[in-house]
Image: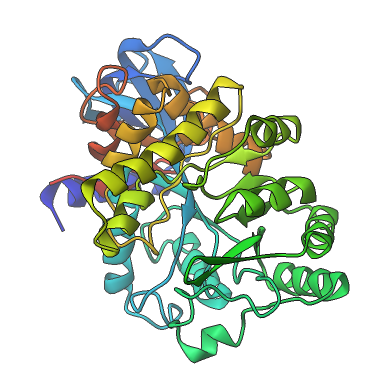
């Protein structure tokens, strides 16, 4: 544990122990939200896990102070596409706390994420991770999860088939609308916060198996009846079309096939949100040893889809597919989103206000303002000047408690 993190943890414990104690982030540049001009040389006062005040010289005289002069404070960042997959998460209920804490830090909290949406994992393991975080046994983000996805009939993707046999047994491939409704009900009853559909499933050899639209529609209707959102993994334009026609809430990826203007217009009309995952495409191309030209074309096609979607006014949610993707650093994702035409404040919205409103509207998250929960990310740089500063994180705080501090 670093000296800085140890000091912060002591501050956090003191703030939790005494209701009148306050922690102040002193002298930062503060982005209240993506549409408000930044506040300079500003204090953020935290009390009882919430933001008590934001302003110049707002700190109580006896407050504990974290010097943030020269740093930038934004609302806690959301990653709306992660996976708790891999040996580091297996048997999470009994894994050593130190090991899980290190994994959470390496994949998530060191990059400022205070809320994450897992959209495909073994549900019992992810629920165990969430429980241990909520019990403050582990320093980690808020965790939402879709648990085990639903696939087309006989349609588990080729790259998922190497998962442990006990996990593969939990994966459902509904063959009728009734099967889909039952699968959704079971997942939600076990504790899932969403449903994930593979409306297009890669089978290898260039084959993408579509989910029958009547099955997708039944799953979406069942999920919405239970009050949970639906993500879709499209894989290609056909999968995206099925997802939108079925009424899914979020497309979990762009792809390299190219979306027609009609498909983009349908997404916009249905208020379908998009997680671009642009960094995933060079990552996949490298695994296939693709040429530089082919990689650039692959990324360019996906970026063009994001550009068209943003120009139409579509809602973008930030997400990186980490957990599946083993390169956890989101720096390139920010750069690719900017190259596709997103402004720094549009990226900030994708990281904060948009996911907060869509997924947790009953919680006051996504803004740095009095009365909001003190989920905060402190950056070493101004993202309005350099979007890659979103990845240069000095401190991550959840409910006013430090869960990460840089060395």
Location of residue 68 with respect to 17 vertically, above or below: above
The image position of residue 303, as x and y in percent, is 43, 35
Tally of marks: 0
The image position of residue 170, as x and y in percent, is 62, 83
Q: Relative to residue 371, is residue 282 drawn left or right?
A: left
* Quadrant in which residue 228 is drawn: bottom right
Q: Is residue 363 visible?
A: no
Q: Relative to residue 380, is residue 24 drawn left or right?
A: right
Residue in the image at 62% along x and 68% along y: 149
Residue situated in front as seen by the camera: 197 or 396 = 197
Residue situated in front as seen by the camera: 266 or 74 = 266
Q: Is residue 382 visible?
A: yes
Location of residue 205 with respect to 193 vertically, above or below: below
Residue in the image at 32% along x and 14% along y: 42
* Quadrant in which residue 168 is drawn: bottom right
Q: How is the image coloured?
A: rainbow
Location of residue 221 with respect to 88 vertically, above or below: above
Residue situated in front as seen by the camera: 4 or 198 = 198
Residue in the image at 37% along x and 23% along y: 44
The image position of residue 355, as x and y in percent, is 57, 38
The image position of residue 87, as x and y in percent, is 35, 79
Residue situated in front as seen by the camera: 95 or 145 = 145
Q: Quadrant of the N terminus?
A: bottom left
């Amino acid at each position: 544990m670093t000296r800085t993190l140890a000091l912060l943890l002591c501050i956090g414990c003191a703030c939790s122990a005494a209701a009148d104690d306050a922690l102040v982030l002193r002298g930062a540049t503060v982005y209240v939200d993506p549409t408000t001009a930044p506040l300079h040389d500003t204090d953020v006062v935290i009390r009882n896990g919430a933001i008590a005040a934001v302003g110049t010289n707002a700190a109580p005289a006896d407050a504990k102070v974290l010097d943030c002069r020269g740093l930038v404070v934004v609302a806690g960042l959301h990653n709306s596409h992660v996976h708790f997959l891999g040996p580091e998460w297996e048997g999470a209920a009994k894994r050593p706390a130190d090991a899980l804490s290190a994994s959470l830090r390496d994949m998530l909290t060191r990059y400022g994420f205070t809320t994450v949406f897992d959209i495909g994992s073994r549900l019992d393991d992810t629920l165990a991770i969430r429980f241990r975080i909520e019990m403050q046994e582990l320093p980690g983000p808020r965790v939402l999860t879709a648990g085990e996805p639903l696939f087309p009939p006989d349609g588990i993707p080729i790259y998922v088939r190497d998962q442990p046999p006990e996990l593969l047994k939990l994966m459902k491939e509904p063959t009728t609308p009734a099967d889909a409704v039952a699968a959704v009900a079971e997942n939600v009853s076990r504790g899932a916060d969403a449903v994930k559909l593979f409306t297009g499933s890669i089978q290898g050899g260039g084959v993408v198996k579509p989910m029958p639209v009547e099955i997708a529609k039944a799953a979406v209707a069942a999920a919405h009846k239970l009050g949970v959102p639906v993500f879709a993994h499209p894989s290609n334009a056909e999968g995206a079309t099925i997802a939108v026609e079925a009424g899914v809430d979020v497309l979990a990826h762009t792809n390299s096939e190219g979306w027609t203007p009609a498909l983009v217009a349908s997404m916009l009309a249905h208020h379908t949100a998009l997680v671009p995952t642009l960094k995933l495409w060079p990552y996949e191309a490298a695994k296939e040893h693709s040429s530089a030209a082919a990689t650039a074309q692959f990324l360019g096609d996906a970026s063009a889809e994001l550009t068209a979607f943003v120009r139409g006014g579509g809602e973008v949610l930030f997400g990186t597919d980490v957990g599946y993707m083993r390169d956890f650093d989101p720096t390139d994702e920010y750069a690719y989103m900017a190259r596709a035409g997103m402004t720094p404040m549009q990226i900030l919205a994708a990281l904060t206000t948009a996911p907060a409103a869509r997924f947790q509207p009953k919680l006051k998250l996504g803004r740095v303002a009095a009365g909001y929960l003190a989920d905060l990310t402190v950056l070493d740089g101004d993202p309005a000047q350099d979007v890659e500063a979103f990845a240069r994180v000095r401190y991550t705080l959840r409910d006013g408690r430090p869960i990460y501090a840089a060395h």
